[in-house]
Amino acid sequence: MTMSKKISRREILGFAASGLAGGALLLNRGGEAQAQTAPARQRWEKSYSGGSLSIRPLPPALPGKDYRPVMIPNGAALPFKISGGVKVFHLIAEEVDHAFDAGLRAKCWGFNGRVNATVLEAVEGERVRIYVTNRLPVATAIHWHGFYLPNGMDGVGGLTQPYIKPGETVKYEWTMRQHGTLMYHAHHDEMTQMGMGMIGMFVVHPRNPAPEDWVERDFALLLSEWVIEAGTARPNTLKMNDANILTINGKVFPSTAPLVCKTGDKVRLRVGNLSAMSHHPLHIHGHHFRITATDGDAIPLLAQWPETTALIGVGQTRDLEFIADAPGDWPLHCHMTHHVMNQMGHQFPNLVGMKAGGLEEKLRPLLPAYMSMGHDGMDMGRMAEVMPMPNNTISMKGKAGPFGDYISMGGMMTLLKVRDRLKSYDEDPGWYDHPAGTVARQATDSELRADGIDLSGLGADSAKKEIPRQP
C-alpha cells in the first residue's frame, strides 16, 4: 500500500472504456510495469470523502490472479460471486457458539459462523454488492467503517437506513474509490452488538500497486475485548470496563495461530481495534517496524519512523511493515500488562510480600479447599490449570514453553515465528531451535568472579555489594 497511487476518476473511465481487465498485475512482484509513484503531498487535497460518486466501475479482480489475499489467523475470507460485473458477498449475522480457548466458550454474535474473524476483500475500482441477512433475534445495521460511499450505504440504523429486522436481508452496494485496511461492525445498539462480537476487517487492495506495496506475508488482525464472567454462557456487554478476555481475531493465547514467516520476508500486519473501551499499544519483539498506513490511507515514506510499539486506538487501523530478518519465536502482544493475562485479578487485594504463616492450617478446618496465593505475585498459569475452577472459564495465563517453564502470558498475544527454512507457511514450525551459545543461561561462579561480581553476603542493599572489576 505504501506510496501506491490511488486510482483517479480519469483512470477508471479510461480502463472501463478500453475494456481492460482489472489487474493481473500484483503477483508479478509488485507489478513494476504499471506501478506509479504518487507525488509527495504538497497541499490539502480537493476531497476527503472520495470525490464524485459518478464513476464507472472497473471489472472485478480475482484472488490469486489479480491480488494476493491476506492471511487471516484463526479466520477466513468471505467468499464472493461475480454477477453482472459486480462482486457479490453475502454476510450473515447470527449467533455463534464460539471457543476462545480450551475451557472457555460463549454464545456470541458474529458473521458466517465466525466471531471477529470473517474478512471481506475487494479491489479498488470494482463495484461490490453486500447482502446482509439478519438471523439474530433483534434488529441490526452494518456500518462500513472508513469507506467512501453514498450516505445511504453508511449503515447507521435509523439515520441512514431502516433497521435490518430479524429475518430480513438488506442490500448495500457501492464502487470502491479507495484502498486500504478498513473494518465493518454493527451500528445499532453498538454496546450490545459489538460487545457480542459483530465486528470484522475489510481489506481493499490497490488497483495500481507500487513496488513498495509488495509483501510476502500480509496478515489481518482484529483486536477486541470481552467480559465473560466465570460460569456464564454469554458476554456481559453492560460493563464499561473490567474486560477479562482480550482477543486477536477472537482467540486468546495460546489459541492464537502463530504468524509464520521465512527469514527475509517483508511482512505487513493490518491491525484494527474494535474493542469497546481500550486502546491497545501493540508491541513486537526482536524487530522494529514502520507504520505505513493509518485508517486505510498510506503514510508517505518520509513521514514514517521506526517503532516497536504502535498504539491502536478504538476504531482505528494501522498497517505495520517490517522485514522478518531475525529467526526465532518472537512475542507480538498488547503492552498493557493486564491485557496479556486472562481473568485479570484487579478485584483481588495486593498480597505481595504477605507472610501467610499458619493461615492455611487455621482455615482448612472451615474451608478444606483453601489455598493462600498472591503473596509472590500472580505467576500461576500452570497452577491454575490444575486448580479447581468454575465452569466455563480459563486460567490467567500462558502455556508450557520449550524450556520446561511456563510462558506467563495470555490474552491479546500471539507469536511471530521466523525461520530460515519452512515446509509450509500453513504449518506451525514448532519451537525455535536456538543456535549454540545464543540462549541466556545461568551464570557460572567463574564467570561472575571474572567480571567482578560477588554474590556472597548479598543483602537487600545489593548496589553496594559489587566489587570493582580487576584490571
Image (cartoon, grey):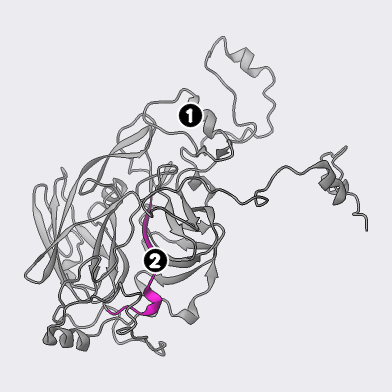
Residue 119 against residue 465 in the figure, above or below: below
* Magenta span of residues: 208-224
Residue lying at the far top of the rendered structure: 365
Quadrant (top left, top right, bottom left, bottom right) of the N terminus: bottom left
In the image, what residue occupies the spot 49% across and 36% down?
396
Q: Please name the residue that numbered disc 1 is placed on.
A: 385
Q: Which residue is mark 2?
A: 216
Q: Secondary structure at mark 1?
A: helix
Q: Position of residue 80 (x, y in %)?
A: 16, 60
In this orientation, which residue lies closer to the viewer: 154 or 29?
29
Whether residue 2 is visible here, answered yes or no, is no
Mark 1 vs 2, N-terminal side: 2
Viewer-nearest of discs 1 and 2: 2
Q: Quadrant of the C terminus?
A: bottom right
Q: Residue at x 37, y 60 (%)?
A: 219
> In the displayed structure, does residue 207 sit left or right of residue 213?
left
As shown in the figure, which amino acid type bears the numbered disc 1?
Glu
